[in-house]
Amino acid sequence: MIILLAASCATAPERNAISMTKSPPQWTTDHPSSNPIATQWLSTFNDPGLSALVQDALNNNYDLKAAAARVDSALEQVRIDGAPRWPQLYFAPGYQRTTLTAGETGVFEALFTMSWEIDVWGRIKAAQQAAAQEAEAVTADYHGAKLSLAARTAQSYFELIEANLQADVAEQSIKDRRIIVELVRGRFARGLTRGLDLRLVLTDLANAEAQLAGARNRVQIVTRRLEVLLGRYPDNSLKNLAVLPTPPSVLSAGLPSELLARRPDLIAALSRLQAADSRVESAKKLLLPRITLTATGGTSSPALTELIDPRAVAWNLAMGLVQPIFTGGRLKAGIRLSEARTEEAFNQYQSTALNAFREVEQALAAEQWLREQEQALKEAVEQTLASRKLAVYSYRQGLIEILTLLDSYRSTLNAQSAHISVQRQLLSNRIDLYLALGGGI
C-alpha cells in the first residue's frame, strides 16, 4: 500500500538550469566592450560571398535535412505516445460460413470495438510529456546543427581563401628564386662563384616548387570539402578569388549564466533530463491499478442488406480494473532503469555545461593571443622583406655567402605564410566564439 501511495504521488521534479549549474559571475578572460553579443554574426564579416555560401549550405546540406526529418519524427512520436489517452475505436467487418447437417449458413457481421484506458494517475500523460520533451531536445539539436553548419561553412570558406593565398605566396617565391638562380648561374659562368652555390640555389628552387604543389593540393582538398557542405558534387569547380576579411571588432561575451538559455546543446541536454524525469514518473505509475473501458457492438445478419437495420444492433459495455501483483520484478526494474537514465542525463547536462564554459573561455583567450601574434608576424614580414633586399645586395657585392641569401628568402616565405595562417585563425576563432556563445546566424 505504501508503494502504491508513493507511486500515485510521483511527479517529475522541476529542473532549472540556473539552480543546477554552478556558473561563475563573469568570464575570466572577457574584456568589457560596448559592442553587444552578435545575434546575427554572419553580417559582421561584411562579405556577401560568404553570406551567399552559408545560405546555400543551409538550403542544400543533406545532414541538415536529415536533422529536420528527425524533428518531424520526434513530433509524430509525441502524437503516438499521447494516443492512448483517447478512446481507440476499430471497425471489424466479417463474414462467417458454417456447415451443418441441415446445410450451410453464412452470416455477415459489422462489428465495432472500443477500448479506453482512463488515465486516472497521469501515467500516459507523463509518457507523452517525456516524448514532447524529447521532441524539444531534437528541435534544439536541429538549431544547433544549423549553427554548426553555418560555422563550418564559414570556416571552410576562410580556409579556402587562405589556401589560395598560400599558393600565391609559394608561386611568387618560386619566381623570386628563379631570379636568384639566374643571378648565381651568371656569376658561376663568369667564375665569380662556386658550383656548390649553383647546386644550393637549384635545390632551394626545387623545394619551393614542392611547396607550391602541396599548397595547390591543399586548395583542392578544402574546395571539395566545402562543396560537400554546400550539397554539391565535389568536382573542385568552386573558385575563390576573395581576400580574407578584417576580423570584427572585440565584442562582449555577456554573463556566463546567460549562456545556459542560449546554447542549443544546453537546451537539448536540459530537455532530455526533463524527459528522463517524466519517464521515471510514468514507470512508477505502472504500479498503480489500470481502469479500462471496453465496448463492442454491431450487427450480424445472413443478408448483407440487413446490416443497416438498427433493430439488429447489439452492444456490450464493460469496465475492468487491473492491478499488477507479481511481474517477476519487471516493473521495479523499469523504475530503476529510468532512474539510472535520469542520473546519466543529469551528469551529461553538467558535462555539457562545463564544456560550453570552456569553449567560451578558450575562444576569448585565443582571440587575445592571436591578435598579438598577428601583429608580431606582420612586423616580421616587413623585416624579412627588408632583410632580403639587403641580402641580395650584399651577395652581389660578395659580402655574404649564398646560404645567408637563401635563408633570407626562406624567412620571408615562412613569415608571409605564418601571417596569412594567423589571419585565418583569427577569423575561425571568432566564429568559434560566436558558436560557443550560442548566437544566431
Image (cartoon, rainbow, N blue to C red):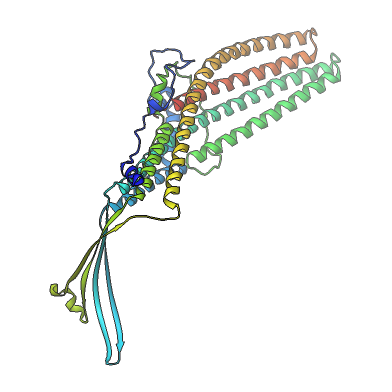
Q: Kindly give the residue lying farthest to the bottom in the view shown.
A: 102
Q: Image height check: is 414 above or below 338? A: above
Give residue 342's position: percent from left, percent from top.
43, 39
Answer with the quarter of the image where residue 276 lies.
top left
Work out whether 247 lies above or below 296.
Answer: above
Q: Is residue 28 left or right of residue 380?
A: left
Residue 11: image location, x then y, percent: 33, 39
Kindly tell me whether residue 184 is visible in this rendering. Answer: yes
Percent from the top left, x then y, of residue 424? 54, 23
Q: Nearer the viewer, residue 404 or 182?
A: 404
Q: Residue at x 36, y 50 (%)?
A: 287
Residue 440 lies, in percent from the top left, at: 39, 29
Dividing the picture into quarters, in which one does residue 19 lie? top left
In the picture shown, does residue 165 fall above or below 59? above
Q: Residue at x 54, y 39 (%)?
A: 237
**Residue shown at the point (58%, 13%) measured from the top left:** 378
Q: Quadrant of the C terminus?
A: top left
Q: Residue furthest front?
A: 1
Q: Is residue 341 left or right of residue 302?
A: right
Please name whichever residue, 37 or 288, is drawn nearer the observer in this view of the structure: 288
